[in-house]
Amino acid sequence: MPVIEVNHLKKQFKSVRKQKGLKGAVKGLFRSEKKIVTAVDDISFSIERGEIVGYIGPNGAGKSTTVKMMSGILRPTSGEILVNGISPVKDRKAVVKHLGVVFGQRTQLYWDLRLGESFELLKRIYDVPDEVYKENMSMMNEILDLKSIIDTPVRQLSLGQRMRGDLAAAMLHSPDVLFLDEPTIGLDVDAKHAIRRFIKEINETRKTTIILTTHDLGDIQELCRRIIIINKGVVIEDGSLDELIDRIAPYRELVIDFYTEQHIEHPNAKIVSSEGSRTVYRFMKDEISAAALIEYIGGKAKIKDIHLEEASIDDIIRIAYGGSSEE
Amino acid sequence: MKKFKHYMSVAALSFRLSMQSCMEYPAAFIGWLISNPIQFLVGFATIKFVVEEFETLADWNFRELAFLYGMSVLTHGLSVIFFTKTWYMGWDIIHGELDRMRLRPMNTLFQFLAGDLNFFGITDLIPGLILFIYGCVSVDFRWTFSNTLCMICALIGGTLIRGAIYLAFGSTTFWTKSPLHISGFFQELFNRTNMYPLSMYPRAVQFVFTFIMPMSWVAFYPASEFMGKESMITLPYGMSFITLGLGIVLFAIACKIFSAGFGQYESAGS
């Protein structure tokens, strides 16, 4: 049975169209134009236990809105969500009991409290037994190195420290599902690394199901076996990263530097560019191997240097988004 | 029962932590501790001045007015501790600050109120208590069983009426999506309708604050029963119970409005 099931999810917001300037503002007092904004149009997917799924899409695609609906913050306009077989619309409390949620843009910790006090309060709220709490805390301490920051008020923590605190807070009640909405946003390389290690570790040791929203393609490459790409409120891709690369960009590029300018052709390779002594060939992986191509070209002219390029994940995502990104 | 114990234990810890976090801002605490009592002293001096000019105010002498004012300020102090959150809730709603409450497996209204008690309110409560004691002593209030019971009902009721109005109007932001900075206005109104005897105002005004916006029940009606005063409504006994009943009913309605509003909650941005 899937841990998360989302069927034809839709969310619309009503907003008032504001007119420009003072004149518009006065006019708006008497006649306001209501506009319906569709943040999530029609999204369906299902996620099995223990998966790490990258939920990606350009700004304004509806990622956070989906996460907020799955975690019971927002009520869907239509469609169905089941988390552990329970609908967050019908029984929010039962769903969030086994759910951990982290928003990178907004802390769930208590601003004026020391980090440790926030944890204590959460322990009380989720009614976590002492042994479980101790066990979880020692594990979080180990992965996230909380000892040095546990007595610091949350408002004084750096972004990276705060994110570590937020992740630990989300894990205190041993949730079996974790939603991470841009957990690495604005973090430096070290902090990002720590957070990725954390995600990997809890997924491996606890089989926690994780949905990860991110713009950081490194996160995806390192963590996600499966990605769901959405744009304009609909799912445009859902599958493993390798599959996606094979489908969207099943080619590789061979860059060859000759000693002199050359024009060597091969029926299975297309010349993408030829500038001076450098020629770039594009070929399909299943039509010809890189070795065979190099051998063929090497037989015709002397090669100085070669390297092989695969479509980068950036390219894949950009192609998948269809170049439409709204900021 | 287990649920109740759980909620109480969370409330108790929240209160302790709120006390601690107030101590994080000692300068602010001292600031309030000095400025809040001044506000009430000025109110008190005004009453004294008015009575010295007119001897009595709608048949109330200075000591009786001090008693009325004491009750009013004490309920204000209590409401500041429990309901300050509602004064700024419009801002919280607009900025998506209520997300956190949806993520915790507890009642949202409980988290909203108990999760963030305002310990700074003690700077309103202390002068309130002093004025209240002063008022009780000056009218020689008798702490018989019946009087004590009535007084407790009146104080709880008065606090709830204040809280209910703040909560109900604060919740409108769920629909309007723009914060209504109206709590100051209501505090002033509560103050005006309970600092002086309502019976000194024109009948139409009395009617409004008795039946339409029942703010005078906070302190004026119970106090007039204790002092044996005639007013728009005169009962031989039981004003305090009406105050308590009204407080409970209004607060229940406000809770319903809050819950209905939360159904409309739209969080904020990403």
Image (cartoon, coloured by chain):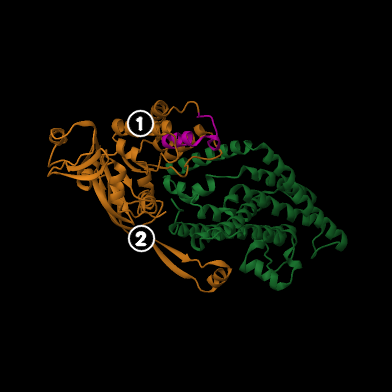
Chain colours: A orange, B green
Above or below, A145 against A7 in this view is above
Q: Position of residue A224 (x, y in %)?
A: 29, 39
- Position of residue A91 in the picture relative to residue A105 (left or right): left
Q: Which residue is mark 1?
A: A197
Q: Residues within 10 Å of mark 1 (few under 14, many from 20)?
A: some
Q: Residues within 10 Å of mark 2 (few under 14, many from 20)?
A: some
Q: Position of residue A115 (x, y in %)?
A: 50, 33
Q: Is residue B23 magenta?
A: no
- Position of residue A249 in the picture relative to residue A145 (left or right): left
Viewer-proximal residue, A45 or B217?
A: A45
The segment highlighted magenta reads A149-168
Residue in the image at 51% along x and 74% along y: A31
Above or below, B254 against B20 in this view is below
Q: Position of residue B263 (x, y in %)?
A: 43, 58
Residues at marks 1 and 2 on the same chain:
yes
Q: Position of residue A77 (x, y in %)?
A: 35, 60
Which mark's residue is nearer the viewer, 1 or 2?
A: 1
Residue in the image at 28% along x and 35% along y: A207
Name the kind of residue labelled 2 in the image.
Thr
Viewer-proximal residue, A193 or B113?
A: A193
Q: Which residue is mark 2?
A: A77
Name the kind of residue labelled 1 in the image.
Arg
Separation of marks 1 and 2 at Cα, in angstroms: 37 Å
**One can see residue A1 in this view:** no
**One can see residue B217 in this view:** yes
Q: Looking at the rendering, in which quadrant would you find the N terminus of chain B?
A: top left
